[in-house]
Amino acid sequence: MPASLPLRAGLALAATLSTAFAADLLPDTPKQCASCAAWNKPQQPFRLFGDSWFVGTEGLSSVLIDSGDGLVLLDGGLPESAPLIAANIRQLGFRLEDIRYIATSHAHYDHAGGVAALARASGAQVLASARSAEALRAGDVPADDPQADFGSKANSFPKVENIRIVADGEALKLGTLVLTAHYTPGHTPGATSWSWQSCQERTCRSLVYVDSLNPVSDEVFRFSGGNGRPSIADAFAHSIGKVEKLPCDLLVSVHPDNTQMAEKLAARAAGTQPDPLLDAGACRRYAARAREKLAARLAEEKAAAKP
Ligand SMILES: [Zn+2]
């Protein structure tokens, strides 16, 4: 019957297309920024511990966790990082289609920029704090972001859909994985750090993916309040205290150089034992540095406010 031919042809075409595009990642327009090229240098993927892998670029972290019942990806780097992250995931033998969730740290273009493309390619749901979800949906930072005054042209990134809001302290269970969200506002209103355990043979370790605790801002913003905004100094200090107390055998920061990842990898490659990536003091040191930086920034603001 001739009438059925177009339908059959259409179905066949749809099947071909869905196979062809199943794992294809269509990247968004690259972000142009001063540090983008350096951040986006390719990085060979490597095992962090157990079922947790680093799949990011040289300057932007992205972590893949195999739960045994699907994958979880943490962060997506820049828009132009998405193809590199996808290639790293495949190089490890995993499939984009198996990513169930993409958990996000903070909604700035250098960590959330690649999330939209990775979510489209994988069909994954995106996990975010309530305040991050706002920014991810808008593809821009909210008015109370410390960098808001840089403007939309500088701050914007591809809008993200299919977001599930995760509460502070909420533990997401998938396969053998229990991934806990820790709201750590300060660098952005929605900043979120994540913790979980990974096991290798019979040893289990506590891993932390820590968000930025860097008090950087545009020219207008004051962490101590002012220019029509309240102080966020106490909330920021509370975030630092939270990170300091996390069980923490292995720390990955959103910018890997903030936890000396390259140096640790070089030491690992040189055969240093025990594994240099296992660094039980890393969260405490990261928090101590953040506390110093915040104190310095608040002192600067105080000095600048004097007539
Ligand atoms: Zn940022």
Image: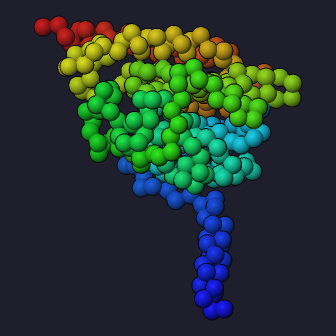
Above-or-below relation of 64 to 276 = below
Q: Is residue 113 visible?
A: yes
Q: How is the image coloured?
A: rainbow
Above-or-below relation of 49 to 13 = above
Q: Position of residue 171 (x, y in %)?
A: 63, 25
- Residue at 70% x, 21% y is 206
Q: Position of residue 261 (x, y in %)?
A: 61, 30
In the picture, the quarter occupied by the C terminus is top left
Q: Position of residue 96 (x, y in %)?
A: 65, 51
Q: Residue furthest bottom?
A: 2
Say whether residue 217 is left or right of residue 242. left
117, 17: nearer the viewer: 17
- Residue at 66% x, 17% y is 248
Q: Quadrant of residue 223?
A: top left
- Residue at 31% x, 8% y is 299
Q: Quadrant of residue 145?
A: top left
